Amino acid sequence: MPTRRTSHTVYDTKYHLVWAPKYRKWVLRGDIRERVEELFREIGERHEIEIDTLEVAGDHVHLFVSFPPRLSISDVVGTLKANSARVVFEEFPEAKREMHGGEFWENGYFARTVGDEVTTEVIRRYIEYHDEEETRPNQLDLFG
């Protein structure tokens, strides 16, 4: 995922997101699994969520994504969950019955930021030595 630009922002944000169906039920199989994958990709395209890698397992999902900084992690997760759950319940009534007619996804999620060359240590050094010209990392190397 390359560095992206909007009218006022240059960004390189990457996140590993994980969540599960309510009660960690094994409902993500067969046609439902395939449809959830399709839905995530469709939703991503509509909402500026770039999906690099996606895995839908039987009882949880993994996404490696990037999105503009004006979107929060919780907004992105909420958008993916709400839109996919609505369609799954409409198209697969048996899933709604299996989930006792309630929510499709659990409330929580896991999120981790992911970096490439710009590691935690590179950022620390850049901040610590920002006034020392000789030891300062090249800004072009840091911000691509």
Image (tube, helix red, strand yellow):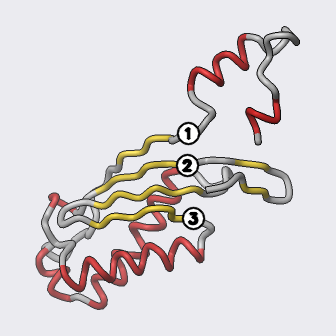
Q: Position of residue 136 (x, y in %)?
A: 80, 16
Q: Which circle marks residue 115 in the picture?
A: 1
Up-down relation of residue 79 to residue 96 (above or below): above
Q: Secondary structure at mark 3?
A: strand
Residue type at mark 1?
A: Gly
Comparing 52 with 77, the one in front is 52
- The percent coordinates of residue 37 (x first, y second) are 37, 75
Q: For the residue labelled by badge 2, is the local secondary structure a helix, a strand or a loop? A: loop
What numbered label is drawn on residue 8? Answer: none
Question: Can you tell which of label 1 and label 3 is closer to the viewer?
Answer: 1
> Which amino acid lies under the numbered mark 2 shown in the image of this protein?
Lys
Return the residue nearer the eye: 101 or 90: 90
| In the image, residue 125 above or below residue 44 | above
Amino acid, disc 3 = Glu
Q: Which residue is mark 3?
A: 50
* Tag 1 near tag 3, CB within 8 Å: no
1 vs 2, front mark: 1
Q: Earlier in the sequence, mark 1 or mark 3?
A: 3
129 relative position to 84: left or right: right
3D distance between C-alphas at marks 3 and 2:
9 Å
Name the quadrant of the N terminus.
bottom right
Q: CA distance from mark 1 to mark 2?
A: 7 Å
How far from the left and from the top, in percent, is residue 42? 50, 79
Q: Which residue is mark 2?
A: 14
Give the mark nearest the N terminus, 3 or 2: 2
Q: Tell me, yes or no, whether the two marked residues, 1 and 2, touch with CB atoms within 8 Å.
A: yes
